[in-house]
């Protein structure tokens, strides 16, 4: 059966979003982030080219579509960051991205293009995206969790040295345990609030039981993988997500909340007591206040437009004898890279989005903000952020 142009575009975008968290090539130096960067940038711009071609070969009344407030904010943010990058300490790195994170303007522009493409699809072609892409988010969560659980069992219980790790912690398909736990925490709200696809051929009670069973399996897999990643930021984020989700129910709020808090306390106690050999770890990044303090000092010296993206390493004092290429805090990183002006516009984007998105997306964005206050973000998490902006109500 031949797909329409709109459905063809949707299928390509779904495939890209499903594969992005899973792809990696062990043969290259940065075997996890580099393939994701290339797939994200090339894939989004190919989709952009396809959409332009479709617009040129059919009668789409693009000029009659007014630009909404969120789109204006997103485009303004992109222009401010680009201006800051050109005036920054190392424009080349700011535009292309560093060889470790690949989060320069090329990545930002791809995220903005993803937003614009989906925004156009919803506004001009009247296609609502959340229902269309829910299965993709659930599918990627399932496969990432499955790989992480398999690695966790092999590493922690069978001491399999053939499994790649980072400081003794599993990395899944992400290359970093914080990226692994963070992505699963960001997609956890979609699992918790998933409504099973109702099929008319099944009795109501069967659909209800089947839906609950599948959801329970996915939630258990997600939480298990997050716990095995040992990412404290991701564990904290998933805890807040669970509590917020539970408090959204009208009945038994206090009892359920106390139960979850009790379980979290037990898990933390087990870790601190060392009952699990992978429960404790040491890292030079535990004293993040040193990084944040130096970042704030740099902001004071150049507060308006900052130093350009991916330049934190250049402003971090060499006498600290530490190589730090990121502020380990989203808002501080934006302040350093694009100054107060960039941060104000970014906050405006967040406020405008959070006011107008469904609860599940709001919960995912909340997870994004919590997660981003303690660790750098991965390409996959950045892509998910720009993807989530599209579910705001168009005004």
Image (tube, rainbow, N blue to C red):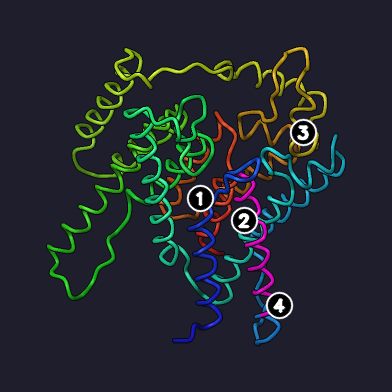
* Residue depicted at x 38% and y 44%: 145
Disc 3 and disc 1 in contact, CB within 8 angstroms = no
- 369 over 68 or under it: above or below: above
Q: Quadrant of residue 225?
A: top left
- Position in image of residue 220 (x %, y %): 28, 42
Magenta stretch: includes residue 36: yes
Q: Going from the N terminus, do you reach mark 4 or mark 2 first?
A: 2
Q: Secondary structure at mark 4?
A: helix
Image quarter of the C terminus: bottom right
Magenta stretch: includes residue 322: no
Which one is in front, 322 or 310? 322
The disc label shown at residue 40, or none: 2
Report the predominant secondary structure element of the magenta stretch.
Answer: helix
Q: Please state the total of marks drawn on the protein image.
A: 4
* Residue depicted at x 54% and y 65%: 13
Which one is in front, 15 or 261? 15
The disc label shown at residue 63, or none: 4
The range drawn in magenta is 33-53
Q: CA distance from mark 3 to mark 2?
A: 22 Å
Label 3 sits on residue: 311
Q: Which one is in front in this view, the residue at disc 3 or the one at disc 2?
A: 2
Disc 2 and disc 1 in contact, CB within 8 angstroms = no
Q: Relative to residue 46, is residue 121 drawn left or right?
A: left
Q: Which one is in front in this view, the residue at disc 4 or the one at disc 3?
A: 3
Q: CA distance from mark 3 to mark 1?
A: 26 Å
The disc label shown at residue 21, or none: 1
Q: Which one is in front in this view, the residue at disc 4 or the one at disc 1?
A: 1
Which one is in front, 200 or 31? 31
Q: CA distance from mark 4 to mark 1?
A: 36 Å
- Position in image of residue 273 (x %, y %): 32, 12
């Amino acid at each position: 059966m031949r797909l329409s142009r709109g459905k063809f575009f949707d299928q390509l975008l779904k495939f890209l979003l499903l594969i992005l968290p899973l792809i990696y090539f062990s043969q290259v130096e940065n075997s996890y982030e580099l393939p994701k960067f290339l797939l994200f940038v090339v894939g989004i711009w190919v989709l952009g080219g396809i959409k332009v071609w479709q617009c040129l070969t059919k009668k789409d009344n693009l000029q009659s579509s007014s630009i909404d407030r969120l789109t204006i904010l997103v485009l303004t943010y992109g222009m401010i960051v680009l201006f800051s990058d050109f005036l920054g300490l190392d424009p080349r790195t700011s535009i292309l991205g560093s060889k470790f994170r690949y989060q320069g303007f090329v990545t930002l522009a791809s995220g903005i293009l993803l937003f614009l493409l989906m925004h156009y699809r919803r506004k001009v072609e009247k296609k609502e995206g959340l229902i269309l892409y829910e299965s993709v988010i659930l599918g990627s969560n399932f496969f990432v969790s499955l790989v992480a659980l398999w690695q966790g069992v092999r590493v922690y219980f069978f001491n399999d040295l053939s499994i790649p790790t980072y400081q003794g912690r599993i990395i899944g398909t992400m290359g970093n345990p914080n990226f692994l736990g963070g992505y699963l925490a960001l997609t956890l709200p979609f699992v918790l609030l998933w409504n099973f696809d109702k099929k008319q051929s099944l009795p109501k009670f069967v659909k209800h039981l089947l839906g609950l069973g599948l959801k329970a399996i996915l939630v258990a897999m997600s939480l298990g993988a997050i716990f095995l990643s040992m990412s404290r930021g991701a564990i904290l984020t998933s805890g807040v997500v669970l509590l917020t989700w539970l408090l959204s129910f009208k009945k038994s709020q206090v009892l359920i909340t106390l139960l979850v808090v009790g379980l979290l306390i037990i898990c933390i106690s087990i870790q601190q007591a060392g009952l699990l050999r992978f429960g404790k770890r040491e890292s030079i990044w535990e004293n993040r206040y040193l990084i944040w303090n130096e970042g704030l000092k740099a902001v004071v010296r150049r507060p308006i437009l900052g130093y350009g993206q991916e330049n934190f390493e250049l402003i971090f004092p060499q006498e600290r004898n530490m190589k730090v290429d990121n502020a380990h805090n989203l808002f501080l990183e934006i302040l350093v890279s694009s100054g107060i002006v960039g941060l104000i516009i970014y906050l405006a984007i967040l406020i405008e989005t959070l006011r107008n998105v469904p609860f599940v997306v709001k919960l995912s964005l909340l997870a994004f903000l919590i997660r981003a206050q303690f660790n750098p973000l991965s390409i996959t998490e950045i892509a998910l952020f720009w993807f989530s902006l599209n579910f705001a109500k168009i005004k």
